Image: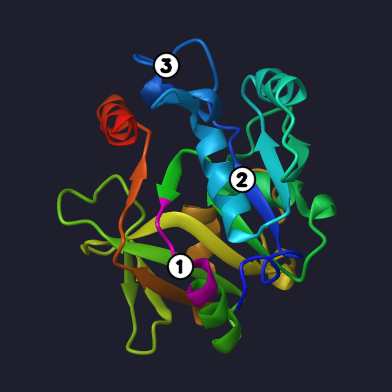
Amino acid sequence: MAKDSTFENIDVLVLCGGKGTRLRPVVSDKPKALADVGGKPFIEILLDILASEGFHRVILGVGYLKEEVKNHFQANPRKDLKIEFSEEDTPLGTGGAVKKAKPLIKSDHFLVLNGDSLASVDFNEFYQSHLDKKAMLSLALANVADDSSSYGRVMLASDNRIASFNEKQNLVSAGVYLMRKDVFDFMPAENSFSLEHDFFPKITEASYGFVSDKGFIDIGTPERYRQANRLFSK
């Protein structure tokens, strides 16, 4: 499947509305999405990858310091991507942020990314697996050899269906999800909730994992932020 057409009509939602409390010691003056990594705002690194994969339309879920994110793209418009904003006035959690963006999502299947992590996923294989399984939700998973306690841990059944969450496993969510649009019909009635804790465990029957051996990085803590800077500075 050609990268210039496969994802042309697949919307992407990037969740970048969190306060980034743990990152404050090293990034205190801007939202996490604009944290400088290797001389470039982290969100721009994510968007470069999405554009290179053939995605055309991106929705940024913004909340904390959202005007800074909006101002950044007003001052630095991208010609390769159409960018829209789903704005939170109060914190909604990851699930609430996805639910809030529903009116902007046009595609039957859509990609959701955490705005503070970067996974090396083969998007073509991931999307094909999602379609082949007829999944409502597909999660990109990665093996984390060291302490995985701060990530969403997952156990898979033999057919790669999600068996359960929060197990003592090294298989963790890479913060990359493919969702079928009817996923909204099954979300909690509340406006504010967590995908990982309040929603995903309730739809395991329609959820599958896609294991990537390419790893991922995130900038959610000072140490991981420094690791990401060392990596991208090279």
SS for callout 3 = loop
Quarter of the figure that contains the C terminus:
top left
Q: Amino acid at mark 1?
A: Asp
- Does 223 appear above or below 153? above
Q: Residues within 10 Å of mark 3 (few under 14, many from 20)?
A: some
Question: Which residue is disc 3 drawn over?
Answer: 27
Q: Amino acid at mark 2?
A: Val
The alpha-carbon separation of the residues under discs 2 and 3 comes to 20 Å
Locate residue 41, reporting x and y percent.
Answer: 52, 27
| First along the sequence among labels 2 and 3 | 2
SS for callout 1 = loop
Q: Quadrant of residue 203?
A: bottom right
Q: Magenta segment, which residues? A: 119-125
- Does 191 appear above or below 159? above
Question: Which residue is disc 1 drawn over?
Answer: 122
Locate residue 109, reporting x and y percent.
Answer: 70, 69
Q: Nearer the viewer, residue 53 or 210?
A: 53
Quarter of the figure that contains the N terminus:
bottom right
Q: Residues within 10 Å of mark 1 (few under 14, many from 20)?
A: few
Magenta stretch: residue 83 in it? no
SS for callout 2 = strand
Magenta stretch: residue 123 in it? yes
Q: Residue placed at 49% from the left, 32% from the top?
A: 42
Q: Which residue sits furthest top?
A: 29
The answer, for residue 203, to whether it is visible in the render is: no
Question: Which residue is disc 2 drawn over?
Answer: 14
